[in-house]
Structures are given as structure tokens and as C-alpha cells.
Amino acid sequence: MDENVSGQIEALRTPDLATAASPRHPLAPLTPAEITAVVAAVRADPAFGPALGSASDLGVFFETIELLEPSKTTLREWRGDGAIMRAARANVFRNEEQGVWQLTVTLDPPAVATRQFVAGARPMIQLEQFIAIEEIVRTDPAFIAACAERGITDMSLVCVDPWSAGNFGLPDEDGLHLSHTFCWLRTRENDNLYAHPIGGLNVVVDIKRGKVLRIDDHGVLPVPMAEINYESQFRDSFRPPLKPLDVVQAEGASFDLQGHAITWDKWSLVIGFNAREAITLHDIRYDDRSVVHRASLAEMVVPYGSPEPGHARKNVFDIGEYGLGKLANSLKLGCDCLGHIAYLDAHLTTMTGEIYTIENAICIHEEDSGVLWKHWDFRTDRAEIRRGRRLVISCICTVGNYEYASYWYFRQDGAIEFEMKATGVINTTACIPGKPSRYGTEVAPGVEGHIHQHAFCARLDMAVDGECNSVVECDTEAVPPGPDNPYGNAFFLTEHTLHTESEGARRADPAKQRFWKVINSHALNHVGRPVGYKLEPRNVITSFLSPDGPSGHRTAFMRNHLWVTAYDPEERYPAGNFMNHSSGDEGLVKFIAQDRGIEDADIVLWHVFGLHHPVRPEDFPVQPCISTGFMLMPNGFFDQNPALDLPPDTNRASKRHGASSCCHG
Ligand code: CO
């Protein structure tokens, strides 16, 4: 989109013509009424409506419709006079042309404001296409024949997962929008299909034409037929249940949720949501001091390590190629979420422009987080203890076989934590029993799970006490033994300011205990130092992909653990805007080629972290949550422990275990 779009939209800024459906905050996601208005505006535009003379032509399909977030300037003005400007981004595509239209749409009045055609771009694979792809494969005569060769005749039990195809330079795939599928078998209804991989059989589907392009039959492997299930219906017995552990908040929760704006303890923020990133958080403040302007999980990719036929293509961008938000679960009270819960629904759109609502998509609640601080003075036998509590904002998204559960935690000491829990079912393939490849682990006889990684990239548009921030790299150094270090114990912290984007591409260095600090040199704390927040790279991973390979080239963002860029609202995704079949030339590598200054500037941090996952037998048939994430922790932002003012309190409901606890006395 051209750089003047924000300006053009702002020229159309009008006071809020409030309707019952209008949101309270300019950063709140689009309402169903607004989405409907966007769809109508696009359909009414002669360039995108039904083709003349064709009653059956629906015109364009919708990839995503989301809020066009107001500029920082507009938000500042809004704080002043309360006027709201609302506009949307819409990505639309046609089956007949290879590319995606990026539109901006005003809502008042509803009209397409700007348009840009990105030739060659492919839209995200849509949820509605998952089932369609499976059906296309299952009904293909050549595929039916390949299954028959493997002794499979009941096609209703065959399952096909619609993996993204990557960009492998195969001549017959050039210019198409494809899914490279993997197949499994159920033995009966609800049986765990991933226990029965149909190895060696991949079908390449032309998504837009709705047909099979090619069947890659790499040879017959025995399909493991032992049932290995996790659903309760398949179990005869369960371990004895534990006694109830109830989270009771008799007086309700301590947060105040007004539409999508939430305040809790000293925190305030706005909760957004879109089809691609799922949860987005905005205008995060502590005690009304700004910390982060916008935070989201902007991309993730899952590279697999096997070079074997078919499997070498497994390198999925679950956010950029599918959209995590559209795959969010409708959460269940008492199961996904424990305690006193507030939910927000997510309103998205189908390909054909109908409202697609995920009820209870975002879970908001409080948790006890253990002791926050304590000291016992042994001389006086006096102890001061404060328990901490945290606000949790979360959602769970299912991408094919895997679940990704995102948790944002806000702590009373000013720290913000992000945790990603991965669960669900590992991707499986068939192997000769007892002889897995060196690229995998045999998790059950004849069932292999390949080594892989889950690389995540958080986009953190920082605003530590304002927009002008810098990043300081902090390493710890030992002093060489000598006159300055007579006992060999000396070590100290060094600080190095990162000046330019090329200098801002950094890797973690555990040998130097490296971390990064986002500082504001215009705001000093009580010892005269710039206020700051530190980012500790606690969960970094190293990519094993060759940078020159087709997957390695597209996962360039994985090569560093921190990237710092000058703020540009159109630089949103670290591997590029359109990830299906992407060339790998877009994203962070291109952003930093501008080599803009990042010192004392409005900057964005891109933190890459992840899970290194050599599969364990215990990850099957359903994987216990494995966890990764990062923390933003105040570092000189406050003059002292900001949680000193927590009132002393004792939880009266707590009881001693033992005989007396049974007497309720
Ligand atoms: Co995994």
C-alpha cells in the first residue's frame, strides 16, 4: 500500500456517527456491522462486484477484512477530542487472476478508498478450503487407485491435511496456488488418524481450479494399523480423580472490560484480534505510562528436518499461510478456562463475505502467580510477603494437527510475559517398524515423528514512556586476570547502543548473558539513567536450514533473534505479506536493507524465539503442552520495586492439610 494511504484516510475523518454497534475504542476490532459495510462497499465497487451479465459470478473472494488501525497521530488527537475515525483493510482475490488486491475501505461513508494489486501474491489458505481440498483428493480416480494399491478401499476413512506447498521451483507448479497434501487413515469413526499415516503418498492440489495437479507416489509403505487414541470414548479406565480445586472469586474479577478496552490493577490496554495474527494488544500502559504501542505474534514457521521425498517440503508458516486468528477455538468455560472468566468473541469473514463469528475466542481472567516478593528479617523475626496476581489474555488456535495456545500475562511488578504452549498431535509418517529414519523418532511401531522446530516472531512496537526509544545491547564481560582483577572474579555489564537497522539484527549470546534494553533517553529515573524495559532472549533457537535452500531462503527471519526497525505501519510481517509460495525476498531482510536509523526513534522490535522439537514418544498420541515465550521486564523504568504498594493480605480460604481440614472447624 502506498505511503499516503493513512493521510488519505485521515482526510476523510469525521466525528463518530455512533450506532448501537459502534465500538468504544478506535483500536477495537471491526464490529459485524462494520464488516458487513466493508463487504457491501467492495461489492458495490465496479472493479470488484459481480461481473456484468453473470448472475452466478460472486465477484471477488475475501481473504481478510480487518481494522485499518488509526495512525499514532490520530490516536493522540482522539485522546483530545473523542472523535473516532474507522476504516478497514480488505484483501480480496479472484480465482481467475494470480494476485491479491489490497484495499482500504472507509466506513463513513463505506467506500473503497485505495487499491493495490499485488501480482503473483497468493491469499492465505482459507478454513473453508481445508475440507474442499480433502474432498478433491479423496474423489480423484488416480488417488483412489493409489490407495487401492495400499489396500485402502473405503475412501470415507481417508483424511487429507492441506499443507502449504512452499516454493520449490518445480516447472508444473509455477504460478499456481497449491496445497501439497499428506494423507492418513482412520480405522473407524473418531479414531486418531495420525496413528495411521499413509506414507509415501502426496497429492498436489491446485486450490483455485479445485483439482488435482499431480500425485507424488514415492512408493508403498505399510500403513500402521494399531489404534492409538486419546479421546475419552476409547478408554475403559481413568486414574482416580483428584479432589476439586476450584477458583472462586466471590466478588468477581478485578478487571474492568469496556468493549475491548481493559483496565486491571495498574495496567490498561486495548485487546484487538484479526484473522491472521489472532490477538493483538494495543496502547499498553502501566500507571498510565506507555510501555508498548502494539504487540502481536506476527509470524511463525515450522521447518521439518527430513530430506525424504515429500517431507522435505514441510516448512509451514502457520500465521502467514493460514491465519492463526481464523483458526481460533471457541473456548469452553471450566475446560480451556478456569475461574472467573470474561470472553470476547471474534468477528471475521468467510471467503464469500459472510460474518464468521468465533464465540468466546479470547479468554480474559486473573491468576494467582505465587509469591511476588518477600523478606524475613532474621534479627527481628518479621516477614513481609506479597502474593502476586496476573492478568491473562489468551486464545487457542488449531492449525491442522497442532494447537497453539497464546497467553499474554501482565504482572503487578510491571512485567509483560508471553507464553506459547504447543499441544495437539505431532505430524506423523510411516516407517518400517523398528527402523525409523535418522530424521525422526519412532513414537509407536511403524509411526515416526520428524524432528522439527517452531519458530515464532513477536512484533513489539515499543513506546517506553513515549515514541522515541533506543535499543541497548547488554553483554557481561569478565575482566582478564591481572592488576585490575587480582582474584579473577571481576565481571561487569557493558552497554552498546544499536544505531542502525543493519546493526540492529542481533543474535542471542548465552556466553555473554546477552539481553537488550529498550530505553527512552528523554525520561530519566531517580538515579539519572534513561528509563527502560529489558527483553531477555530466554527461548531462542538456531535454524538448521541452509540459507540458500528454498525453505531456508523463506525463513530468513529465523536467522536472528532480534531485529530492530524504524516504525512503518505497513511493515507488519517478518517474512512478508503474502506467504503462500513466497519467494523469500520480502520481510525483515528487505526492511533493514533501508538501514534506517533506530537510535532515539520510533522503533519496532521483532523477537524470534521458539521450540526445538526432536519428538518424544510421550508426544504421542497427543502432546502434553510444551512451552516457549519471552518477557519484557522493567529495567530502570521505575525508581524502585513498583509493587511495594500492594496491600498486605492473607488468603482466609487457605487451610492446613491434615485431620483438622476435614472437620470444617
Ligand atoms: Co512440535
Image (cartoon, rainbow, N blue to C red):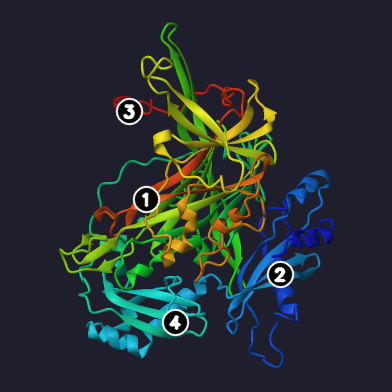
Q: CA distance from mark 4 to mark 2?
A: 38 Å
- Distance of mark 2 from mark 1, alpha carbons? 39 Å
Q: Residue at the spot x=21%, y=72% of the render?
A: 225
| Labels 4 & 3 near each other (Cβ < 8 A) | no
User: Is the residue under label 3 in contact with that under label 1 (CB below 8 Å)?
Assistant: no
Q: Give residue 628's position: percent from left, percent from top.
A: 42, 46
**Considering depth in this image, is 523 or 82 the residue closer to the camera?**
523
* Mark closer to the observer (4, 1): 4
Residue at screen point 50% across, 78% down: 177
Q: Earlier in the sequence, mark 4 or mark 1?
A: 4
* SS at circle 1: strand
Element assignment for label 4 = helix
Q: Is residue 659 above or below residue 520?
A: above
Q: Quadrant of ligand 1?
A: bottom left
Which residue is painted at 46% across and 21% down in the image? Answer: 374
Mark toward the start of the polypeptide (2 vs 3)? 2
Is residue 62 left or right of 5 when viewed as pictured? left
Give the amino acid at mark 1: Cys
The amino acid type of the residue labelled 4 equals Pro
Residue that numbered label 2 is attached to: 38
Pointers 4 and 2 in contact (C-beta within 8 Å): no
Indicate which disc residue 625 carries.
1
SS under mark 2: helix
Q: Is residue 526 left or right of residue 509?
A: right
Q: Which mark is residue 610?
A: none
Q: Mark on residue 171? A: 4
Q: Locate residue 326, reporting x and y percent.
A: 54, 64
The single residue placed furthest to the left in the displayed view is 434
Q: Position of residue 582 (x, y in %)?
A: 51, 69
The 10 Å Cα crowd at callout 4, few under 14, some 14 to 19, many 20 or more, is: few
Q: CA distance from mark 4 to mark 3?
A: 70 Å
Could one spot residue 331 in this view of the protein?
A: no
